[in-house]
Amino acid sequence: QFSSQLKYYHEPTENFQTVNNWNGAAWVSNSASISTTTGWKGVALNNNDQGDRGWIATIDIPFSSLGLSTPPEAGTTWAFAVAVHDRDNNSGTNSSIQTWPESISSHQPTTWGTLHFGETTYSTSDAIPGGTTTIRQGLNGINVEDSHVGGSTICGAAFDPDFFNGWGDANYANDTQINIQNQWDVSDWPCFSKYYVKFPLTTLPANKSILSATLTMHQFGNASPSEANPSYIQAFTIHDDWRESTITWNNAPLAVENISGATVGVLTSFPDWPGIPIQWDVTKAVQEAYAGGQPVNLALYSADGDYHSGKYFSSSDVGDWNAQARPTLNITWGNPAFELEVTPKSAYIPANGVAQFNLLINHNSGFEETVFISATSPLNDLDITFSTDQISAPGGEVTLEITDNRSNPPLSGEIYAIPITTTSNSVTKSETIHLFINGSQIYLPIIESK
């Protein structure tokens, strides 16, 4: 647990930071080295009678303080959570603790979020390309809801100078132009703006595999071109529902996962309509939504630090004259090449016994490639044989036998996971079977409640 507290600039930093470990019953002090920085913007620190524009804390944690000499490998995940404790008076009265995720227990990592090292990954499909579906507002009668929340394109000017009188509850339904903007100067939070969009998948054919999906937005401008820098705008999945007519900064649902990002450059002049296309790979989001029978629900935001980071795009509400500029989802889908069914999934045999599994391979329409079958034995004397190692269209059955030929098998029970791989020129599928050798059965009593 790494903690940082707001302080006056002249106060020693070490008095306002802590490192603790959970010992199973309580948090105890740890001597690990960290670096913290806090900042504040306003007229007088913690003075509610004068301008108070917010504070920020930065915690730098060396990997060496976590017992690592290098960053974790790509794909590694850590449990991670954040809590903000706010106290505004000397009497010690605390405001409600703000947390991410919203419902966490400080000593229960299973309630925390996940920090993923490296780019997100998604399952690659074994399907044969079958077609592409384009989803856009007005196309084939589709309604795509979208909106930005926060300061819009004018830094919440309608609520200047107080901003607390409605900025967080402002709704921008039907805006034809949207802004995505962030920066490190916390006092400029009225300029923060993020974007939500929701694509229905009702025009996708049923029972398909999603091969790829791309979100395209058209950029037509940006804040202060002579002073701006490129932005890295990230795409996030959203699970909770929202409506364009009611979404605001305060009620907008939290992001679930950061799945993609794209660098958006600076435009020094108007590029003419429809603008410059910017694309995000949202395959993972579409795969998940399609599998769950839900619309694709996304948010776009950046972690920019520079001033003038706003990037301007056309929304789904732009007129038909500029329909090409509307946010567009292009989805390539396909038909599964072949089906693989293995029965049983597991088998129990005595020492020196023989286990038998049946593999059923069915080619789908349009797939003519020969499928080859293989498996690797976990032991030298655990022999694997197939009745045939290849199946041609339209499909067929294969018998797999595993024979324990060891001269001195152990007396204790063993469990082996054995992957079966089926491969054609273009498609690979795998399924794992489990073999239990010389296992014992334990019978437990049945307890009936009365």
Image (cartoon, rainbow, N blue to C red):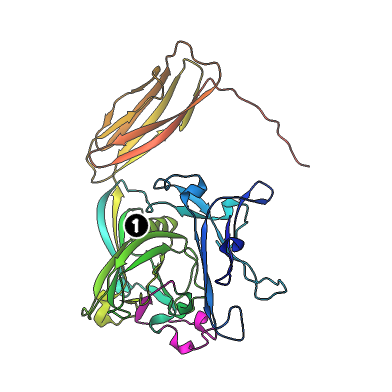
Seen in the image, is 142 located left or right of residue 106? left
- x then y, percent, for residue 201: 37, 64
304 is higher (above) or lower (below) than 333: below
Q: Residue at x 44, y 44 (%)?
A: 69
Q: Residue at x 34, y 62 (%)?
A: 261
Seen in the image, is 436 located left or right of residue 442? left
Q: Residue at x 32, y 29 (%)?
A: 374
- Is 317 contained in the magenta span? no
Number of numbered discs visible in the structure rendering: 1
Q: Disc 1 designates what residue?
A: 283
Question: In the figure, residue 81 lies in which quadrant?
Answer: bottom right
Q: Secondary structure at mark 1?
A: helix
Quadrant holding the C terminus? top right
- x then y, percent, for residue 17: 58, 60
Give the class, few, some or many, for how many residues have Cα within 10 Å of label 1's Cα (few <14, many ≥20): many
**Magenta segment, which residues?**
155-184
Quadrant holding the N terminus? bottom right
Residue 268 visible in the picture: yes
388 is higher (above) or lower (below) than 55: above
Q: Residue at x 28, y 36 (%)?
A: 423
- Residue at the outermost top position: 407
- x then y, percent, for residue 400: 37, 25
Nearer-the-camera pick, 51 or 259: 51
Question: In the figure, residue 286 lies in which quadrant?
Answer: bottom left
- Is 163 contained in the magenta span? yes
408 is higher (above) or lower (below) than 52: above
Nearer-the-camera pick, 387 or 444: 444
> Hey, what amino acid is under mark 1?
Thr
Nearer-the-camera pick, 348 or 432: 432
53 is higher (above) or lower (below) than 96: below
